[in-house]
Image (tube, grey):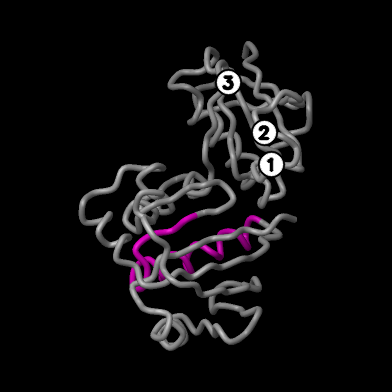
């Protein structure tokens, strides 16, 4: 499976971060792979220096308050965590790790697989909601469809839907379908059907026309499924 790569802009410097992460998270940066208490997965941690204009990258994805922008701009190092979540339970075990980092040590979170970039406050709000997956999935719009981006590390294809078939452009339908597939074991094979919370019935179909080249970082090797609206 494709690993997750998650970055946290830290308040602490390159010199300070190893000690602070060990004290607060029991995260030993001297090791290539570590287990963080409360999560059964192996994490590969990498600490790097600060990135210039990082707040601009975050603001491109979601608006930042002046306070959030200043906090991200003032970061003094970057912690990258790479890991493979082999089950929904393992993915969910990462959330307390992220929460602890963001409540004490980091000003934001960047999900490299999807390009999602959130301030600490917004990410914590998202993962405390009904669909934590929303914080990890981005959306790509074409002339007639909306595609998800970022589901490959979950072992899933990305999904798409025709914008004309759904209210609000399709984000709610796509994230709800992805959540049902990941956490409720909804069948997503071509020809299977799924009903959303409003009672609309969609059929999954293999999708061959996608907005990404096969060699691009955005390409999902698990494939793509289109949600086609059917009569209930």
Residues at circles 1 and 2 in contact by the CB criterion of under 8 Å? yes
Q: Residue at x 37, y 68 (%)?
A: 106
Q: Which residues are magenta?
A: 88-110
Residues at circles 3 and 1 in contact by the CB criterion of under 8 Å? no
Q: Is residue 56 visible?
A: yes
Q: Position of residue 34 (x, y in %)?
A: 62, 80
Give the number of the disc on residue 212. Answer: 2
Q: Nearer the viewer, residue 177 or 168?
A: 168
- Does residue 138 lie above or below 146 as drawn? below
Q: Residue at x 43, y 50 (%)?
A: 117
Total numbered badges shown on the rendered structure: 3
Q: Is residue 36 left or right of residue 77?
A: right
- Does residue 194 lie above or below 81 as drawn? above
Tag 3 secondary structure: strand
Query: Quadrant of the rendered structure where residue 24 is?
Result: bottom left
Q: Residue furthest front?
A: 52
Q: Is residue 202 left or right of residue 62?
A: right
Marks 2/3: CA–CA distance: 13 Å
- Does residue 210 lie above or below 54 as drawn? above
Q: Nearer the viewer, residue 120 or 210?
A: 210
Q: Which residue is mark 3?
A: 145
Whether 13 is among the magenta residues is no
Q: Nearer the viewer, residue 229 or 29?
A: 29
């Amino acid at each position: 499976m494709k690993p997750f790569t998650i970055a946290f802009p830290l308040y602490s410097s390159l010199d300070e971060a190893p000690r602070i992460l060990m004290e607060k998270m029991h995260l030993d940066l001297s090791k290539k792979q570590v287990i963080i208490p409360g999560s059964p997965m192996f994490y590969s941690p990498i600490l790097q220096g600060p990135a210039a204009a990082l707040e601009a990258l975050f603001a491109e994805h979601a608006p930042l308050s002046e306070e959030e922008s200043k906090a991200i701009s003032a970061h003094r190092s970057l912690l990258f965590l790479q890991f493979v979540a082999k089950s929904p339970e393992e993915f969910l075990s990462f959330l307390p790790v992220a929460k602890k980092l963001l409540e004490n040590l980091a000003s934001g979170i960047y999900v490299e697989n999807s390009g999602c970039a959130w301030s600490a406050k917004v990410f914590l709000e998202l993962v405390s909601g009904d669909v934590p997956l929303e914080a990890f999935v981005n959306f790509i719009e074409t002339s007639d469809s909306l595609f998800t981006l970022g589901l490959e590390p979950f072992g899933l294809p990305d999904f798409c839907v025709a914008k004309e078939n759904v209210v609000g452009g399709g984000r709610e339908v796509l994230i709800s379908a992805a959540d049902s597939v990941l956490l409720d074991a909804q069948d997503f094979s071509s020809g299977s059907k799924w009903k959303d919370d409003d009672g609309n019935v969609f059929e999954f179909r293999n999708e061959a026309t996608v907005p990404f080249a096969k060699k691009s970082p955005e390409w999902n090797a698990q494939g793509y499924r289109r949600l086609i609206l059917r009569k209930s």
